[in-house]
Image: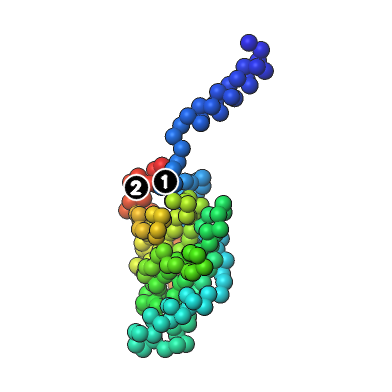
Amino acid sequence: MPNSFRFSYLCCAVALASLGFPGLDASQTISSNRLPMWEEARKPAAKGTHVRLPKDILVRLRSAAELIAPCDREESAKIDAYRVTLNSRSPAVAIIAWGRGFCYCGATGNCQFWVFVNDHGKNRPVLETDMVRDFGFLKAKTNGYRDLAVWSHDSAMRSPARLFQFNGKEYLEECGWQEEYEFQELPNGISVQVGAPRIIDNTCSLSPTRLR
């Protein structure tokens, strides 16, 4: 068999064999990024684009916040918003609402957090949670929507993280981990973080959907 023919034959065989493997269905997690998720989700681009909060979402969140004294109208308007594309192959766009100020946040800086998607012209909430100090979306998708990582502030030395995945209707918490930080005190008395955080209690490594 000539070498050129043998090479073409092997290429075709590999391609046909790959078609024979079971494909990922819509309920599975699809990931092509080799970065650990705690690094990928910390990238600035993982938050999407900072935008103005749509009026219907603002009215909804302010109305709920103003029922809690002493939350006034000025404080209840302190909400950051981001626009995130959940699936580049479809018009699936999310609006992230991240509360700021004492109406939505605790003393440690953990705040209320919402994800809305546009459903037949209306912004429908698919996630409402709290204790969020930071967040970022991953390239990995579950049921067509990108996975979401959120962090809470526990102490200067530790930051718990949670991973949310879309189940077809809403985002649910799937697993989590903790990040431990090490600090070194400089001669001027200022403490600085040393190296990358240590990842502990990582239940995502045991999650079936994270292993697919």
Query: Who comes first in sequence, dot 1 or dot 2?
Result: 1
| Dot 2: element | loop
Q: Amino acid at mark 2?
A: Ser
State the image coordinates of residue 154 (x, y, percent, origin top left). 35, 67
Neighbor class of circle 1 (other Cα within 10 Å; few <14, some 14-19, many 20+) is some
Question: Do we see residue 35 in this rendering?
Answer: yes
How far is the residue under mark 1 from the one under mark 2? 12 Å
| Dot 1: element | loop
State the image coordinates of residue 58 (x, y, percent, origin top left). 48, 78
**Which one is nearer the viewer's eye here, 121 or 208?**
121
Taking the view exactly as shown, the residue that stands out farthest to the front is 120
* Residue placed under numbered mark 2 in the picture: 207
Horizontal arrangement in the rendering, residue 164 relative to residue 47 (left or right): left
**Which one is nearer the viewer's eye here, 68 or 34?**
68
State the image coordinates of residue 2 (x, y, percent, origin top left). 66, 12
Position of 51 relative to 148 (above/below): below
Q: Quadrant of residue 193?
A: bottom left
Q: Amino acid at mark 1?
A: Gln
Position of 183 relative to 52 (above/below): above
Measuring 47% from the left and 52% from the top, which residue is drawn there? Answer: 144
* Residue placed under numbered mark 1 in the picture: 28
What's the image's color scheme? rainbow
Q: Quadrant of residue 165?
A: bottom left
